[in-house]
Amino acid sequence: MKKRIVIFASGSGTNTENIIKYFQRTQFAEVVLVLSNKKDAKVLERAKSNNVGSVSFTKDELFSKDGVLKILKESKPDLIILAGFLLKFPEIILEEFPKKVINIHPALLPKYGGKGMYGNFVHEAVVKNKEVETGITVHYVNENYDEGAIISQKKVKLSKTETPKTVAEKIHTLEYEWFPKIIEEVLKYPGNFLPQP
């Protein structure tokens, strides 16, 4: 039986598409559903063009027992991935799927995390503070923004001439290379990554 992955995304979905294609090349796992809080998000088109089901939902449906939670229960995911999902993740889902929700953040947490710190806002802050390195953090999701137990971090060096755009490009390269591999590791060896009580 293939492991089942569900992805939540809010934007264009390049990471989502990369993850879908990565697992389409394996017999180990598959992305069975993509969910978005924006009905016109490009990620929904990307899912469709890769033969993956997709559903958009409202904020009310995200926090309702009869909305997104019901869809997830029917989908029976082994792992839920947040890939550029911008809403705070509801506790009713975290309670139903304990230690099965992971997120990627475009910086080395705990630096540059928290509410409002996503995408270009992160890269701008990294450049402004003249950081010599940045990277990605894959972590479990808990009830607070970017505070769940860290699973893996990958770093990249920065030069003095970086702009938010060049930092974004370096981060995307890291995400493409590492995020699917880290997801696969978590699915294969969950005990190695579970946060300590």
Image (cartoon, rainbow, N blue to C red):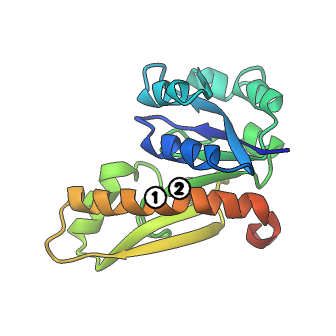
Note whether 25 is above or below 136 in the view shown. Answer: above
Locate residue 172: give its quadrant: bottom left
Q: Tell whether label 1 touches label 2 (CB within 8 Å).
A: yes
| Distance (Cα) linking label 2 and label 1 | 8 Å
Measured as percent of width and height from the top left, residue 68 is found at 70, 26
Q: Nearer the viewer, residue 175 or 72?
A: 175
Measured as percent of width and height from the top left, residue 36 is found at 54, 29
Specify the label residue 34 is tagged with: none
- Left or right of 94: which side holds 14? left
Locate residue 158: give its quadrant: bottom left
Nearest-to-viewer mark from 2 and 1: 1
Q: Is residue 144 visible?
A: no
**Residue identifier under label 1:** 175
Among the two numbered marks 2 and 1 on one chain, the one whose residue lies closer to the N terminus: 2
* Disc 1 residue crowd, few under 14, some 14–19, many 20+, Cα 10 Å: many
- Left or right of 106: which side holds 59? right
- Left or right of 73: which side holds 18? left
Q: Is residue 52 visible?
A: yes
Measured as percent of width and height from the top left, residue 55 is found at 60, 22
Circle 2: residue type: Ile
Instruction: Tell me the residue at 79%/45% (across/down).
Output: 2
Where's the N terminus, which quadrant?
A: top right
Instruction: Tell me the residue at 22%/61% (across/down).
Output: 166
Specify the label residue 104 is tagged with: 2
Measured as percent of width and height from the top left, residue 187 is found at 75, 57
Residue reaching furthest right? 1
Instruction: Tell me the residue at 30%/51% (across/down).
Output: 120
Circle 1: residue type: Glu
Q: Nearer the viewer, residue 130 or 74?
A: 74
